[in-house]
Image (cartoon, rainbow, N blue to C red):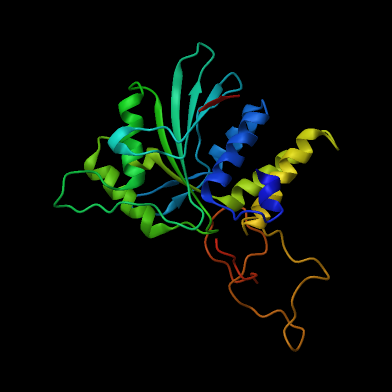
Amino acid sequence: MESIILRRKISIQEDFLTAALADILTDFDDISLLRNILKSCGSIGSGGQINLHRQLPIADGVSYEIELWPYWGNIGEPDMVIWLKNGNNKEIAGVVVEVKYEASKSGEDTEEEPKLRDQLGRYAQGLDNLLSTEADRIVIYLTATSFPPLEELARSWKAISQKTTLDPSRVLGWISWRDIDRIFSDFRRQLIPDSIHIRRIDRVRELLARAGLQLFEGWNSEGAPKSPNHQIPKTLQWLEYRSWTGWKTVLAPPRPRGLIIEN
């Protein structure tokens, strides 16, 4: 499928990106890749702010399986659900990854209506219905934007807080596709040169680049744009995107728009 997209035979769609991410997570029998993705997710505070470096209990003995687009009745169909199990095959966490490319999450809650409509809130409730009391419930909002959609996240936080028994600060998280690309890039350095795994991860990174979702790692000496007097203007910019730490007074390029599988 990726080769068809890269040859521009069909346009990139949200579901293709979801499937590509799931394929990478299942192709590599390495919990460290999933651990790095989950640790890179920011948890959401009460004001919609991003708290970085979330810690999750993912030891080396943990295994996982991935479910794509499960049907959860009135709750909906989350894009991806990752079920984590310990060495005794007991589920210790459920992680919903809601993938977005050009669209935004659906559902808008009002205080007058008791029914939970927010998409991320509904998926949090779905996990709560399916998991044991001691298991972690995590809903990750994966977006095409390099910066967190704070208003959307604040609304989801409020919906979960008011209409479920869950703590949204422990449940709700956000990550960018450019974070995913950076994690793939770092993971690639650990692989055997010229191996099929290198080619596999390069193909997915090429897909992200084609979608305008690749990490910007700074201008090289030949590629940097110049102002008329050859001075780089002092404007809001990103020289290297790692994770959201706030705006910096530094130069940024134009930002582009953005089944069960066992490992």
Most distant residue in the left direction: 112
Most distant residue in the top direction: 88
* 104, above or below 95, in the image: below
Q: Quadrant of the N terminus?
A: top right
Image x and y of residue 184, in percent: 68, 43
Image x and y of residue 106, in percent: 35, 52
Question: Quick check: can you spot residue 157?
Answer: yes
Image x and y of residue 10, in percent: 62, 54
* 201, above or below 106, in the image: above
Residue at 16 percent across and 44 percent down: it is 114
Residue at 44 percent across and 58 percent down: it is 149
Q: Nearer the viewer, residue 75 or 147?
A: 75
Residue 8 shown left or right of residue 77 in the figure: right
Q: Quadrant of the C terminus?
A: top right
Residue at 27 percent across and 54 percent down: it is 108
Image x and y of residue 185, in percent: 71, 45
